[in-house]
Image: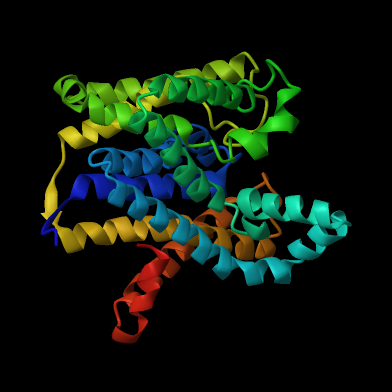
Amino acid sequence: MEKKRNLSIDLLRVIAAFSILILHGGACLPISGTIAATISQYGVPIFALITGYFYFKNPTKERRIKTISNILWLWFFWILVYFPQAIYSGSLNVFFNAHPNIKDVFWGFLNLIIYQGAGCFYGGWYLLSLAVCLLIIDFCRRHKVMWMGWIFTIVVYIAGLLTSNYQTVFPKLLPQYRSSIVTWGLFGTLVWCLTAYYVVKYEQVLRKYIKTWHWLVLAFGLTFTEFAITRVCKFNTNPAGFNNQYFITLPISIVIVFIYTLNHSKMADAKKAKFLRDISTLIYLVQFGVKDVLGNIYKISIPYYTYPYLFNTIIWTLIISLLIWFVSQLPYFNWLKKSYE
């Protein structure tokens, strides 16, 4: 059992989790909307990059099975948790009314579960995507066909750019491909899994250069500059923080932030550091139920959020996440650890 963990990496997870909270609860608002459109876009990539990094550090068959199993278990567990909410909200009634025959029901239900999280756990796309994309890049690695991974990733990423921050270049791409294939689809984390593989491969070279805080200025500067360009040139006319997941420079910025964190890592007691990892996972998974409940209370319609809604989303997500963690430490509730480990 490990005695020390990288505290800095687990702290980075927590920061990423809170950035996603701001994205999901504060998009389109004057200040938080800008954060959601820029810094919050680091959240999911950082989560995916960290998972991919630790996998590719030791990509054995046993580790592959364990990593994919854990990811899919979290997806399945929280689908079950949120399923009653889908029934209560009427999402399933709407679904069945829109799919009159068996064939439509089958494909529609598959789409509902994979892309829409049974109508309420819409963050579940990330877990499925991470599992699928890790397997794709690892397959390319094992069979020495990384060029295939590169081609697939480039195609997906270009499609992502054209359906988010550069959507007005080819506007007809938006309704057809955005939700089901690229941004929230099965291949949404492909670029981050590929990036993780090469970060491991060239880690020592990258760590040799990315040491000072000036690199962080460069990383954030690239993101804010590109955000400004997409707005001034009207490549993306949506409210800030809404539908702008892909930046041309984002992979560079994510690598810089991650390598900088590695170069300034602090080791700590494994239990304390693992607590941060567990809480970051719970924050991501719990927020969707909190958002839906508060959305009904505040009469929120996406993307028109309010600051009271944002603040309460953050506070209640954190409270419930901490509550689940502390209860899971009790003798008869150890099974709750399966909801985040």
286 vs 117, left or right, is left
> Which residue lies at the image location 61% right of the left edge and 28% below the top edge?
164
Above or below for 287 versus 261 = below
50 horizontally vs 192: left or right = left
How many numbered marks appear?
Answer: 0
Residue 297 in picture, x, y percent from top left: 66, 65
Horizontally, residue 95 falls left or right of residue 294, namely right
Using the rendered view, name the quadrant where residue 170 is placed. Answer: top right
Colour basis: rainbow
In the rendered image, the residue lying farthest to the front is 143
Q: Nearer the viewer, residue 326 or 228?
A: 326
Q: Nearer the viewer, residue 20 or 315?
A: 20
Q: For residue 325, which quarter of the picture?
A: bottom left
**Residue 281's spot in the image, x, y percent?**
39, 56
Residue 197: image x %, image y %? 32, 31
Residue at 51% x, 38% y is 36
Q: Quadrant of the N terminus?
A: bottom left
The location of residue 63, given as percent across then percent down, is 29, 50
Q: Is residue 220 visible?
A: no
Residue located at (53% from left, 19% from top): 228
In front of the other: 92 or 267: 92
Q: In this orientation, does residue 314 appear?
A: yes
- Image quarter of the C terminus: bottom left
